[in-house]
Amino acid sequence: MDPSPRPVGSAARAARVAIIGSGFSGIAAAVALKRQGISDFTIFELSAGIGGTWWNNRYPGAEVDLESHIYSFSYARSDWTRTHARWDELQRYLESVADRFGLRPHLVMNEKVESVTWAEERGEYDIVTSSGAPHGAFQAVISAVGFLNIPLIPPFAQGETDFRGVICHTSAWPEDLDLTGKKVAVLGTGSSAVQVVAEAAKCAAELKIFQIEPNWLLPKGNRDFTARERRLNRNPLVYEWRRRRLYLQYDLRQVRASHARRGGRANKRRHRAARAFLESSLASRPDLRELLTPDFPVEARRTVISDTYYAALCLPNVQLIPHAVKGLTSSGTIDANGDQHEFDVIVLATGFDAANYLGNYRVIGVNGVELHEQWAGEPQAFFGLMVPGFPNFFMMYGPNTNSAPLVSFYEAQARFPGPSLPRRPATSGPAPGASSPSGRSAPRSTSPRPACSGG
Ligand SMILES: Cc1cc2nc3c(=O)[nH]c(=O)nc-3n(C[C@H](O)[C@H](O)[C@H](O)COP(=O)(O)OP(=O)(O)OC[C@H]3O[C@@H](n4cnc5c(N)ncnc54)[C@H](O)[C@@H]3O)c2cc1C
């Protein structure tokens, strides 16, 4: 493969492109195509709204761990209300970017992509979606499906259960679910768990957190911007300064991965900071300090970021149960110790099937090879973007590209496909199959040569 970008001339007709997903990375991909002069693309989105992670994760307290000024696009400033935006502000932000770049006419909502199949003889992809509607062929596909969107549900909570109360995963929060005055269980102690616990502790009659293992935890420094700060942030120079400072901070942290390397200077610093935070927050609760001290090194697992979790655990209506849940009864849970607990609501903060990469649709490439079969459990890709045998199939947030600051990575990944896409002959008339407002366009059978395949 020739990874060097080739410019798409203004007279050239670009390929017809399918983007799968309308979260941060799908929007980044669409904006990049537009900026590169490629406007014949369709965005398939299985949900009813734009935003991906920030459309799905609406549990109380859901917010980003990265500062808003860096967890956002370089080309779309926003008047952030908080240092770290909540889910609804992020979701509105993504909608505003979609509007600003005219992406709505390209969107096909409530349409799950089931399969993407390379048609060898035509040199293009056929896409099958949940509605069965015809979408025509695409010369390139940009997968932007993220990898934290297949909820991990414990076996005892799958399908119909005996439990008569409400049970939900954090990523599927029922719109009308209010925890006020309820007996609530939270299963898990990861990033989503600490956020929902901090909010539930304020209003639940009783809150029990089931912990298999504690995580190292660092404070976040989250707060509303003052009116003065917001005025200042509206100045493009101040905004840019904030972004660059944060970018540098995150980028420098990656140098030699010192923060994650045991014995590294940054790692030792983080260890000291996490310990100090634990000890000062739980000074009056030696019982909790013991239960919450991990027995693995800092950064061996994802460090959790929260200002409020330890404080919430000290409230009188909150109890930390240092056991896993093993099963459900009609009125609550049974833990690994054999103890029964009664609840009105059980919140599964049990995370996502992150290892099941591109797990909800099939990708079939050259010679009918299926992508997961080729990966054989070890997803890997050239630049995290492309896989040999899958021409013009690009992955945003691809294997081994999870890092910080993520949105800056998306912008870089999004610029990659456009210049290497096949062109149409300039004589072929109006851009064939240009997406209709519904995004559903007539099938076409032109066969540009596949321009780009990983490997
Ligand atoms: C609760 C939570 C907190 C997070 N906090 C942070 C953080 O603090 N910092 C950070 O950097 N990252 C965080 N992340 C990671 C977050 O997922 C990424 O930052 C980013 O939002 C991913 O964007 P994406 O567009 O790649 O994927 P997603 O946001 O997951 O969007 C993928 C989209 O693709 C759609 N889709 C999936 N499959 C199909 C299909 N077959 N057909 C059609 N559409 C499909 C989905 O419906 C979804 O809309 C968090 C994730 C979660 C779940």
Image (spheres, grey):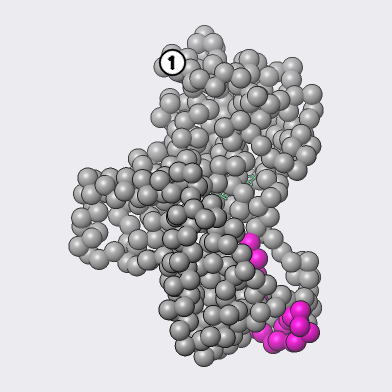
Residue 445 lies in magenta, yes or no? no
Q: Amino acid at mark 1?
A: Gly
The residue indicated by pointer 1 is 9
413 relative position to 97: left or right? right
Residue 342 lies in magenta, yes or no? yes
Residue span colored magenta: 332-351
Residue sitting farthest toward the top? 427
Q: Looking at the image, which residue is at 54% across and 61% down?
A: 298
Q: Looking at the image, which residue is at 52% across and 64% down?
A: 304
Rendering coords of residue 84 (x, y %): 39, 60
Q: Looking at the image, which residue is at 70% across and 18% down?
A: 122
Q: Is residue 223 above or below residue 403?
A: below
Q: What is the secondary structure assignment of the residue under circle 1?
A: loop
Q: Looking at the image, which residue is at 20% across and 55% down?
A: 232
| Camera sees residue 337 | yes
Rendering coords of residue 158 (x, y %): 77, 66
212 relative position to 376: left or right? left
Rendering coords of residue 249 (x, y %): 37, 49
Rendering coords of residue 240 (x, y %): 28, 45
Q: Quadrant of residue 136?
A: top right
> Which of the image's four quarters has the C terminus?
top right
Q: Nearer the viewer, residue 296 or 143?
A: 296
Q: Is residue 213 above or below residue 429?
A: below
Q: Quadrant of residue 321?
A: bottom right
Q: Is residue 443 above or below residue 409?
A: above
Q: Is residue 371 above or below residue 431?
A: below
